[in-house]
Amino acid sequence: MPPTHKSSPSTGAPHASKAHKPSTNTLSLAPSQRQVTANAAVNTQANEHNTSHWLALYFPALPLEVFRLQGPDDAQIQVVIDDKRISHINSAAENAGILPGCTLATAYSITPDLTYFDRNPEREQAHLLDLAHGLYRYSSMVSLEAPDCIVLEIQASRRLWGSADAISQHALNLCADMGHIAIARCAATPKAAIALARGQKERLFDVPLYALELLEQGFSQRNLERLSNMGVYTLGQLMQLPRAGLGKRFGQCLTQYLGRLQGELPDPRQGIRPTAHFYRQQHLLKPISNKDVLLRGPMAYLAKQLEHWLIVHQQGCSALCWHFAPFKGAATKLPVRSGQGRQRHQDLLKLSALQLENTELPAEVLSITLEMTLSQPWVGGNQDLFGSLASASAAANELVDELTARLGQDACIHLQTQAQHSPEQAWRGVQGLSPTHQNPSLEADPASTDRRSAALLRGQRPLWLFHQPQPVPEQHLQLLQGPERLTRSSAHTPNSGVTRDYRDYYIARHIQGALCWVYQTSRGQQTKAELESPRPWYLHGYFA
Amino acid sequence: MPTAPDLKTLHHPLLWRGKDLLNQSLSQHPDRVLSSGHPELDRQLQGGGWPRQGLVDLLLPHAGIGELRLLLPLLELLTQTNYVVWINPPFIPYAAALHACGVNTRNLLVVRTRNHEETLWSMERCCLSGGCAAVLAWPEERKLNIKETRRLQLAARSGQTLAIFFRPISAVERSSLAELRLALRPTENIDQLTVDIIKRKGGWPVQDIRLSLTASTQTRYDVMESLHQQLALWQKHQWQRQELSPRYPASDDTPYADVALELNPLDHDAPAVKPLGGLH
């Protein structure tokens, strides 16, 4: 319940000077007023310590920043037009002497080469929402405050991150990474945090709540005028006025606002919910035809968003798909896969860049979409200081991913042995790396059949195997060892023990010096003449 | 007339001689080299073994003369804990045989590339990644130039990877910035290999190092004198028996080829027939 005030609102002017010095004016105030002033002072002074439950992020240059991703660099003069007047300018425009509030014609008369954008509130909200999704990792309660603020509840996260300052620093870094300048302030109530953040425009740091001017606080123009006519210019002055009288003159909205500002009224906020599916689209103002520009601009931005999404969901991305759409016509798809889940946008971008090199894009890309198609629970890996097995295998995983991205899906294989007699079936190439979680005891056991049979083969099988056996004249060969008869296991004839298709393998020396593995095939039903002639020899491998 | 100083007796602490590099034994640099498994070769190499990092050229007259048997001890050592990448091997590295020789085939990666640029790129990536200990590559000799060998030598050095190029013997004439260059020659004895060191650190080229390859395979391939005669005899018996016994239905001569094509994913992108004995 708001405290009742005895002094009338018309005596605002003398209060104004007192509000700036709360420590000296307490003597002249009524007891109830003293309480209010003390409240304000406590609010502001204790903010940084244990009562700052809310963090507000204010984006002063958001209307301009939403155009930066597609637009040219900052060296050009850029202004944003809102309601036929220039509302936001960049530093180049400021240097040229353009002031916010002037008309476009005035700006053109100052400098003709300027770029102007019409203010786009939907786009601003979309960017704000993207940022809020990124900030979700610092707090479970992230809400938007239109048009240019994000509010985070940080009480619950403070122990995890250390302090409110640490959280706000992290949040600011994240915003800067996404290309937005933000001002962060903590306070006991969300409204107070917003008011503090919005009020810090004049490069004065830590202006207390009661000294904030009313101008930037989202009051309507009419109310601002009426308040200034009363001599009320700061929030402190406004808070000292009796609530009942204020309500009567300005409506319940103002008293509710003041109540929420000071934490006397509850302020329920609607938090954002992270999306279950990652799908983001980026439309460009100007078409891009250069892959490098794409990679550094919109693709990096989308990849960062994906990273935030993945961190929030504790997932690693194992497959994603880029769509590059021209103005007209079908979009080019670029699916990117990764052997293990990845979270860092640098990794994702690197793989995409490798694949992008081999991809034919539309001549002019106007819209880019990033969609995550497959993810898996994130398993954080530790980098080892001493280069152990684990970090080497992580590096190998990365290597295989890169090779596959550049060379194609089946370019990189590992070898497996199989328990088959036929040489072609005794090995197998499998895409990617071999799974690491194998049974080590089985591997190391010298008595296991795998190892025993392998030892028998030592020196009996060639290190090089041909893709196709090649005919070789007999006079080139000098037989050394053999024969060893190998049959295909499935080719047994049912009624006799003798197999039909077999090969007799010999180890032989080729006249050029190589040690070869040669064979003769079985004879099928043949004529007498064929039986008389020698069977042909085939070369199937080298004991290199 | 001044006489030339006797270099052999010249010992001065400030005078460094390249020969000193070679005299440093394996025990002094156990981390920088990998024993080749062939003591005769180890003695000639700086530090006493293959360099742990850097580019090595192996020059062969043709494939299959024993180049893999030369490297088997190295592969056996490296694959226990690290990955070894093979880029564009001319044939299939036969997993069963490698496994039998103690190589951990799980840690072998075979990479197929479509052109020379991709080969070099993959090789450089492998060298720099730190995920593998050695890279074996079979580049296109015609397109390989000295700049690329320099680049790969640097990449292998900075990535602490052993990169091995297999090149035809004709590349002896072409200069390369590899750390070590060896020419391999087959001998009349199948269990032996002659190695010429063309270039090495800390020493002059060495000719005719004869290595015994039986140590790595532990198998001797002896000529069996009577094998041919036995074979002929046995074949004769076989035919006679076949003529007596009921004939089996006719069958396709090479039923294996189809199976092989289906099972081996490598097959479809490899040329079906390679010239016999040719490396490239």
Image (cartoon, grey):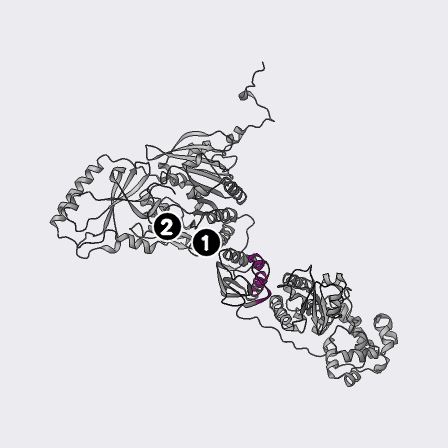
Residue A304 within the magenta-colored segment of the rendering: yes
Q: In the rendered image, which residue does mark 2 sit on? A: B270
* Count of numbered labels shown in the rendering: 2
**Rendered residue at 21%/44% (across/down):** A535
Image: magenta residue range? A282-310
**What chain letter is assigned to the residue under label 2?**
B
* Residue A200 appears in the rendering: no
Q: Nearer the viewer, residue A78 or A317?
A: A78
**What chain letter is assigned to the residue under label 1?**
A
Question: Which kind of residue does numbered mark 1 sit on?
Answer: Leu
**Rendered residue at 83%/73% (across/down):** A19
The image's mark for residue A407 is 1
- Whether residue A136 is situated above or below residue B278 in the rendered picture: below
- Whether residue B182 is situated above or below residue A68 in the rendered picture: above
SS at mark 1 in the image: helix
Question: For the stretch drawn in magenta, what is the main secondary structure?
Answer: helix
Which quarter of the rendered picture does the N terminus of chain A lie within? Answer: bottom right
SS at mark 2 in the image: loop
Where in the figure is residue A158, as x and y percent of width and height?
66, 65
